[in-house]
Image (cartoon, helix red, strand yellow):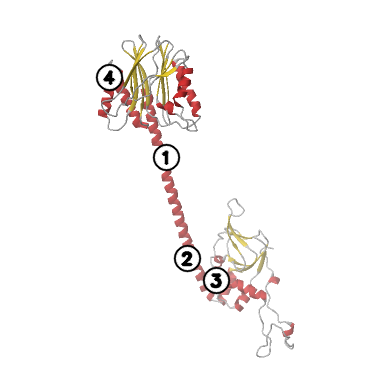
């Protein structure tokens, strides 16, 4: 049974062989030798030698002589432990040292739980529990159980004190062991502290980096929201609706607001102002520049000037006031409701498309032009077009043509013309909706890098 005392299992003193007993001659090949007085000398048995070697591995007993070691292990009880049997558990009072004769012990923390962790194995000649010999109120710091059928010698605290009385130098050996244990413990504690400090520093650095990323993300989110708010504040709430013309518009902002804007507004003398623009920047800087450009165009347009005059004055204001390299492409036109003439000036913007009532689509003639805000004087493309009943005119930003599918293929001008031609029978707003719905289907979730803006007008 585990922990039982088996006196009959103690290693026994080697007996003299029959051939070497007094009065018997020694035969050839005997291991015994004649002493000087004619008596046979006694040699240790193999078992005694093995046991002695096991005890010599223990620092506490390494200075004992062979005879002293033999006497010691013969005096210690030998216990047998079945596999899985506990010698003691974590937290138990400790008062015994266990020396493994055969088998294996395992030292574990939190045994029989989900957090169980094996620290090490303890085999023949190794020992556990030496601190309990001197710490009277000490508790076991880990559990010890047999990994297989295991035999151990057991030295109690009382037996150890008895040994010190017989061999005082054991006390010095124990002091040395305690010093080594304390030094090792201090080194382990210091190493553990260093490792924990390094882990804490790493965790702190990672937390600080994550916090910085979170702050940056929040800053970007706020900036994008501010840019979107500025953009929405510029766009008209409703579009004009007249007996002769219908208007439509749609805008599809990119994740990072790109600076598109549009407006359709009433002017004097039965005229309608139509405006579309695209700032070459993103985020709040783009939104602020867009707001300034829109305000300047609206202010000059309200004075009743031609599109070329409006654009020229706005360019002069922008180049004089701005300190950055931002610029904006713009198409501003005036629609005469009486004559159905649309006169416009184009500052580097995409030329308009027109879909006729018969389904034909054409891109209106154009010449090179400059964006506003680059330099003075500005070169503009000035045009006029007379619209017939059923004609549908489309203004758009380059985000429409440049938008790509998951494979990276751009939507392109030809697709716009095809869809726009098929929409000629629709209203201006329905045509814008159809174009954007088709574009989003084409995108199929691919990233959108720029705003997409459409403005359409149709002759009723």
**Residue 48 x, y percent position in the rendering:** 65, 75
Left or right of 78? Residue 323 is: left
Q: Secondary structure at mark 1?
A: helix
Question: Which residue in the structure is indicated by mark 2?
Answer: 183
Q: Quadrant of residue 80?
A: bottom right
Q: How far apart are the alpha carbons under marks 2 and 1?
A: 45 Å
Residue 299 visible in the snapshot: no
Question: Which residue in the structure is indicated by mark 4?
Answer: 309
**Residue 242 x, y percent position in the rendering:** 39, 11
> Reading the chain from its start, which is encountered first: label 2 or label 1?
2
Q: Secondary structure at mark 4?
A: helix
> Which residue in the rendered view is the most extreme toward the bottom?
37
**Are the two marked residues, 4 and 3, in contact with CB atoms closer than 8 angstroms?**
no
Q: Crowdedness of circle 1 by 10 Å Cα count: few (<14), some, many (20+)?
A: few
**Are the two marked residues, 2 and 3, in contact with CB atoms closer than 8 angstroms?**
no
Return the residue nearer the eye: 229 or 54: 229
Dot in front, 4 or 3:
4
Q: Quadrant of residue 332?
A: top left
**Residue 353 x, y percent position in the rendering:** 41, 19
Left or right of 373? Residue 98 is: right
Dot in front, 1 or 3:
1
Q: How far apart are the alpha carbons under marks 4 and 3?
A: 103 Å
Q: Secondary structure at mark 2?
A: helix
Q: Residue at x 48, y 25 (%)?
A: 439
Question: Which residue in the structure is indicated by mark 3?
Answer: 59
Q: How far apart are the alpha carbons under marks 1 and 4?
A: 48 Å
Q: Quadrant of the C terminus?
A: top left
Q: Quadrant of residue 382?
A: top left
> Reading the chain from its start, which is encountered first: label 1 or label 3?
3
């Amino acid at each position: 049974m585990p922990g039982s005392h088996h006196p009959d299992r103690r290693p026994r003193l080697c007996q003299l062989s029959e051939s070497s007993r007094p009065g018997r001659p020694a035969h050839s090949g005997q291991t015994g030798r004649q002493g000087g007085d004619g008596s046979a000398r006694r040699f240790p048995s193999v078992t005694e030698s093995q046991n002695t070697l096991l005890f010599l591995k223990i620092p506490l007993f390494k200075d004992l002589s062979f005879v002293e070691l033999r006497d010691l292990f013969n005096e210690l009880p030998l216990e047998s432990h079945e596999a899985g049997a506990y010698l003691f558990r974590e937290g138990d009072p400790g008062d015994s040292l266990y020396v493994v004769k055969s088998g294996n012990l395992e030292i574990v923390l939190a045994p029989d739980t989900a957090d169980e962790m094996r620290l090490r194995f303890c085999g023949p000649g190794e020992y556990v529990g030496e601190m309990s010999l001197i710490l009277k109120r000490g508790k076991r710091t880990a559990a010890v159980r047999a990994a297989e059928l295991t035999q151990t010698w057991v030295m109690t605290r009382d037996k150890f004190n008895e040994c010190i009385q017989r061999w005082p130098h054991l006390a010095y050996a124990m002091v040395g062991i305690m010093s080594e244990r304390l030094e090792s413990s201090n080194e382990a504690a210091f190493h553990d502290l260093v490792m924990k400090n390094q882990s804490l520093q790493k965790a702190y650095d990672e937390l600080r980096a994550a916090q910085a990323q979170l702050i940056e993300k929040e800053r970007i989110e706020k900036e994008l929201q501010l840019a979107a708010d500025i953009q929405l504040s510029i766009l008209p709430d409703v579009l004009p609706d007249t007996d002769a013309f219908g208007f439509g518009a749609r805008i599809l902002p990119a994740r990072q607001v790109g600076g598109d804007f549009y407006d359709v507004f009433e002017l004097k003398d039965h005229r309608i102002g139509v405006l579309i623009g695209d700032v070459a920047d993103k985020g709040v800087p783009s939104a602020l520049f867009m707001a300034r450009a829109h305000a300047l165009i609206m202010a000059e347009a309200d004075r009743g000037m031609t599109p070329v005059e409006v654009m020229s004055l706005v360019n002069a204001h922008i180049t004089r006031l701005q300190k950055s390299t931002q610029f904006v492409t713009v198409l501003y036109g005036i629609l005469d409701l009486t004559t159905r003439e649309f006169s416009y000036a184009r500052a580097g913007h995409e030329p308009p498309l027109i879909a006729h009532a018969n389904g034909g689509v054409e891109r209106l003639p154009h010449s090179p032009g400059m964006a506003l805000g680059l330099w003075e004087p500005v070169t503009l493309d000035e045009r006029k077009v007379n619209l017939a009943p059923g004609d549908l005119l489309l203004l758009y930003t380059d985000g429409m043509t440049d938008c790509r599918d998951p494979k990276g293929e751009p939507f392109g001008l030809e697709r716009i013309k095809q869809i726009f031609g098929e929409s000629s029978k629709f209203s201006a707003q329905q045509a814008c909706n159809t174009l954007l719905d088709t574009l989003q289907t084409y995108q199929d979730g691919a990233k959108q890098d720029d705003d997409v803006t459409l403005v359409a007008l149709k002759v009723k």
